[in-house]
Image (spheres, rainbow, N blue to C red):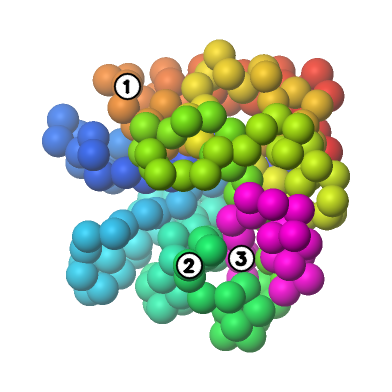
């Protein structure tokens, strides 16, 4: 059974800030700071490199008892022993993925409209990523949604939702009452020098938001 609490602080990896630390070191710092789920996102690696990296990240996540989700690549997700896969609008349909992976594998889907959220739920997704709620430095072409749309999408389905797009610790409070279960972050987590401290700040902000009525 999918535990929606793992969506509280959802880390999405990005190689842009690799250099002063390896990606594994960055992920471990995020985990030490309170990240509750890791999505490994790689657009430039070969399949073999992605798989090798996914296996290493899975071992690391297991130590912290945090699920690992692979972005887009169902083959890598299955072969690496990851806990699930996240599929976007342009990727394989959720229903097809569900047939391949079985009932216990986590499937996340991207939803920017009520119709997309309802379709994801009907197809068997476990959670949805909704956004961009703010302009995102990571995905500058991402279609933005308003706070009102975020509320409508969360209210339209029973799927737990994670907000994504330009979220920083001070902005988390603005999501209160929207129905989201947590936030997905990229640059707010991995761009700072001290990733562990950034994760702690974000996690604290999420807990306060949920206590104040953000939980759907």
Q: Residues within 10 Å of mark 2 (few under 14, many from 20)?
A: few
Q: In the rendered structure, does residue 54 fall within the stretch colored magenta?
A: no
Image disc number at residue 192? 1
Q: Secondary structure at mark 3?
A: strand
Left or right relative to 8: residue 169? left
Which mark sits nearer the N-terminus, 3 or 1?
3
Left or right relative to 63: residue 125? right
Residue at mark 2: 90
Which mark sits nearer the N-terminus, 1 or 2?
2
- The answer to whether one can see residue 56 in this image is no
Residue at mark 3: 107
Residue 203 in the image: x percent, y percent? 58, 25
- The quadrant of the rendering that contains the C terminus is top right
Left or right relative to 14: residue 178? right
* Furthest residue in direction bottom, as rendered: 99
Q: In the rendered structure, does residue 118 fall within the stretch colored magenta?
A: yes
Report if the CB atoms under discs 3 and 2 are less than 8 Å apart: no
Q: Toward the viewer: 173 or 59? A: 173
Q: Toward the viewer: 44 or 152? A: 152
Q: Secondary structure at mark 2?
A: loop
Q: Residue at x 69, y 25 (%)?
A: 175
Residue 12 in the image: x percent, y percent? 43, 44
How far is disc 3 from disc 2 in space, using C-alphas? 15 Å
Residue 25 in the image: x percent, y percent? 27, 38
In the depicted structure, whether residue 71 falls above or below residue 174: below
Residues rendered magenta in the picture: 105-123
- The answer to whether one can see residue 185 in this image is yes
In the depicted structure, whether residue 214 falls above or below residue 66: above
How far is disc 1 from disc 2 in space, using C-alphas? 30 Å
Q: Residues within 10 Å of mark 1 (few under 14, many from 20)?
A: few
């Amino acid at each position: 059974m999918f535990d929606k609490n793992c969506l509280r602080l959802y880390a999405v990896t990005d190689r842009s800030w690799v250099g002063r630390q390896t990606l594994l070191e960055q992920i471990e710092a995020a985990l030490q700071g309170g990240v509750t789920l890791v999505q490994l996102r790689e657009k430039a690696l070969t399949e073999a490199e992605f798989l090798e990296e996914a296996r290493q990240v899975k071992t690391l996540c297991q130590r912290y008892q945090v699920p690992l989700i692979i972005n887009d690549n169902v083959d890598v997700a299955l072969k690496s022993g990851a806990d699930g896969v996240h599929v976007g609008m342009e990727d394989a349909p959720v229903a097809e993925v569900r047939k391949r992976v079985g009932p216990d594998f986590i499937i996340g889907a991207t939803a920017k409209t009520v119709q997309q959220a309802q379709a994801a739920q009907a197809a068997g997704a476990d959670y949805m990523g909704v956004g961009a709620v703010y302009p995102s430095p990571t995905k500058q072409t991402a279609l933005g949604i308003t706070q009102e749309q975020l509320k409508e999408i969360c209210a339209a389905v029973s799927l737990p939702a994670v907000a994504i797009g330009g979220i920083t610790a001070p902005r988390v409070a603005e999501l209160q009452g929207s129905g989201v279960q947590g936030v997905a972050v990229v640059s707010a987590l991995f761009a700072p020098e001290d990733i562990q401290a950034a994760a702690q700040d974000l996690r604290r902000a999420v807990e306060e938001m949920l206590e104040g009525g953000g939980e759907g």
